[in-house]
Image (cartoon, grey):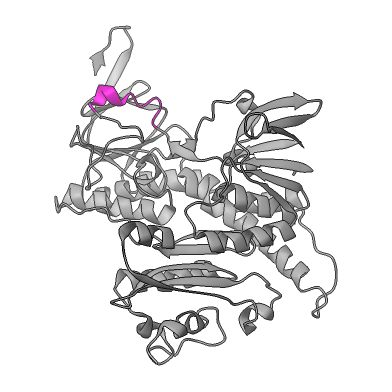
Amino acid sequence: MALCSNRSLIMEREYDLVVIGTGVAGSDVAWHCRKAGMRVAIVDSGDYGGTCGLRGCVPKKVLAGAAELVSRVRGQQGNGIRGAVSIDWPELVAFERTFTDPIPRRKEEGFRGAGIHTYHGVARFAGPDRVAVGGDMLIARYIVVAAGAHARALGVPGEDLMTSSDDFFSLPALPERIVFIGGGYISFEFAHVAAAAGSAVTILQRSGRVLSGFDPDIVDRLLLASVEAGIDVQMNMPLVSIERDGSGLRVRAGRKGEEKTFGADMAVHGAGRVSALEGLDLAAGGVETDRRGIAVNEYLQSVSNPAVYVVGDANAKSPQLTPVAVMDAHIVVDNILGGDGRVADYSVVPSAVFTNPPIASVGLTEEKAKEKGIPYVANAGDLSGRFTNRSIGQKHAGYKILVDEDSRRILGAHLIGPHVEEVINIFALAIKHGLTVDDLTLDAIPWAYPSNTYDIIHMVHPLARK
């Protein structure tokens, strides 16, 4: 116990490891290191559980599942299905909360049961090996920053009037008119949910391209589906300002001299997220930053303080995806426990957008293949007429597959349609293990039929050896 300058008592506690953040990445690091016998403490300024469990993947999939069901039923009208179907928003949110509400208590009880010391409060560095949390000073051999991410500041008048994507999950009622700021996956996923629930929805994208990390041809197909779902997607509409207008909002956007005003009952921030590093006082810990966040090496270790590692969304160099956060955690655990020098590799990361229908991607786009100078062959096509899609009334289904011209190995896969979030994992395995198009044909694997995975043979057949 030490006496600090303001005469209050500071309790010093020593650990092998202190983890800042209780999401999937921080939790995994804490549990694995504790299992290895280390003395571990974990800190969070909010409810235990992190983004994925409380305000990300878990509640999102509940909402998206309801929207998918409504979309499916409406798409099958006239094909043997009759009767109106709708979303009861308060009831849906109550169902969603049966997943999220138990998480904080369950998480903390799990930590304590494992012998991990839990702290609540804002963590800040107080030295290269010290983290202050309220009246406690935690001294550790290793410190892992797993503090997650939050919506980035936009720097426009009235941005405080926006609703965060976090708060969207707990809305007591869904407004009639919603404007989503930004054309990324958060806006598109929520827009499809809101449209299925009956809201008039607009997406404002600052540039001429939405979902920029995905293949543009696949995105164009999704845009058609979005328009049919009643979603108004406005390109080249950077946000200018938001103002109150009676009980609603006036959202102004557009290029200078060409601004438009959109009336809304709610404006939702979906314009990107950044690592949540404010308040950590990184300088006090000797932790250098660059324009993206904490500067880390290939081992996910601070370049300036080797005792500090960064994982999950707090690591701005990695894709902000839950499976990547878990992979980051395993890399850091191996490097802390074994000193193996395990390197982070984000070259094969499948991703999906849970719209109606969903889209999914892995590997290189044509744009990236050209940048790298890789000779490739692309095969694209429509799958809406396939039995698997036509039987459920899905009109928007297709693919684009990229293959190395010389080795015939799969370079990239880009899909739209039912269950593509599952099918894309097959292509991820193929890319990771260097499989060729011939390895995915019916001659090589008798895929289960009927299934969306079976449709792979139609995607690769034109590229396979005759």
Q: Does residue 280 show up magenta in the picture?
A: yes
Q: Is residue 66 visible?
A: no
- Quadrant housing residue 404: bottom left
Q: Residue furthest top?
A: 6
* Residue placed most toward the observer, 451 or 242: 242
Give how far across and how far down residue 134 sits, in percent.
38, 22
Q: Position of residue 280 (x, y in %)?
A: 35, 27
Q: Is residue 291 visible?
A: yes
Q: Which residue lies most toward the left here?
A: 339
User: Is residue 460 covered in magenta?
Assistant: no
75 relative position to 22: left or right: right
Decide: is 201 above or below 259. below
In the image shown, does 454 or 261 lie closer to the viewer? 261
Q: Quadrant of the C terminus?
A: bottom left
Q: Is residue 342 left or right of residue 41?
A: left
Q: Residue furthest right?
A: 83
Q: Quadrant of residue 283?
A: top left
Q: Give, as a single range, the part of the protein colored magenta.
A: 277-286
Q: Is 360 placed above or below 329 here?
A: below
**How far from the left and from the top, in percent, is residue 35?**
25, 52
Q: In the image, what residue occupies the spot 64% across and 84% down?
A: 387
Q: Does the magenta stretch mainly form a helix, a strand or a loop?
A: loop
Residue 26 image offset from top left, x and y in percent = 35, 45
Q: Nearer the viewer, residue 147 or 185?
A: 185
The quarter in which the N terminus is drawn is top left
- Residue drawn at x 25%, y 29% as measured from the top left: 287
